[in-house]
Image: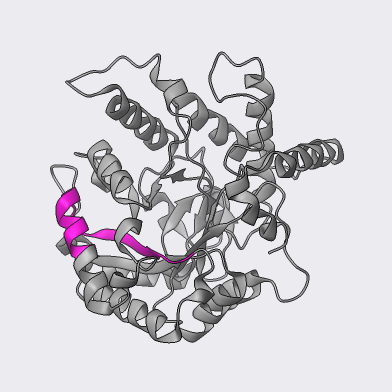
Amino acid sequence: MADGRMTRRDFLQTGASAAAAGGLAMGIGALGPKAAQAAGASDVTKTRSYNPGMEYRRLGKTGLWISAVCLGGHWKRIETALKTVEPKEGRSPFDQNRYDVVTRCIEAGINYIDACCGAEVIAYTQAVKGRRDKIYMGFSWCETELRHPQYRTKDALLKVFEDGLKTAGLDYADLWRITMHERSGEHTEAEVREMMKALETAKKQGKARFTGFSSHDRPHIKWMIETFPTVVDVVVTPYTADSKVLPQDSVFDAVKKGNVGVFGIKPFASNSLFKGDSSSQSPHAEEDDRRARLAIRYILENPALTAPIPGLISAHQVDNVVLAVKERRQELLAEEKAELKAAGREMWANLPQDYQWLRDWEYV
């Protein structure tokens, strides 16, 4: 890894020790470094981009220690951040922005990026060039995955994955998490089994360290976790600033039983939580920063969720969510809960038409 890249051989050679670490970490949820070491999980300090000021959570049975907040692939409203970017080394303003955001993540101990479409895979691969060993990367090429009929066989999906790795210049993916229909139950059982065969094959070939899927369909998520326990390592699914765990038949019952990692998308409901435009000049910037922190703190009160993965468009936003992780050493106070509840009501009222489906995720 002298050049900052980890090859497929590197992670295959360390696979046995990673598995042992995962076994050691069984039953340990969200821990700071001292608590993790006291529990016998000293390997947390060996995670990528480890920072003693960051909290880390075990990504289910993978044994990986993942920062309590991560970087989602989307970059909505990025135009508000590009106005002040000063490109360096021949980068475009966009590429410089992504490089700077990833740099700040690494410095703060954020160690996972979730890329769910081809443009995101390419952008973030470029942003981590020379420092691939600092970041765990989730991979999905949603344009040519299960949402499209011609890509619903094992062979077609494997070709998409292999072509995507080659296009991006990646030797492997830490996590290949196939993007399914939002309502993944619309897929036939035969299609799901083909997907699972593709994931299992990629893992055996050493091209994906771990595997999973993205779905917005709670009953179907539960069925897939229970039916394919050796393939489903990680689930990517919505969890907002106002989501609540169902007292019975929660998807998190299956998550905990199956020891599955969970990344929560849409923590801010596609920015519907905020009053401003996400620019530093917005008159609502300070209030929106506080709402973001309250949301992250609230979400992290669910120990079965590994990490929320908001799309962050500036180094300032990275600093803000990192502050939220530090603040959450205490549960939300009564007045903070009331404040977030009021913001949540505004969030639901502000949902754009194409995000009305998120209402189904108030109870999980």
Q: Which residues are magenta?
A: 161-181
Is residue 177 rendered magenta in the image? yes
Depth check: give the residue in front, 173 or 280. Answer: 280
Q: Locate residue 145 relative to residue 338 in the image: left or right.
A: left
Q: Position of residue 221 (x, y in %)?
A: 54, 73
Horizontal and vertical percent for residue 62? 41, 67
Residue 275 sits in quarter: top right
Query: Depth check: 248 or 256 in front?
Result: 248
- Vertically, is 147 above or below 7? below
- From the viewer's perspective, tell me whether residue 256 is left or right of residue 146: right
Does the stretch in magenta take in 103?
Answer: no
- In x, y percent, where is residue 314? 45, 27
Work out whether 289 lies above or below 267.
above
At 65% across and 50% down in the image, what residue appears?
A: 299
Residue 82 visible from this viewpoint: yes
Q: Does 185 appear above or below 78?
A: below
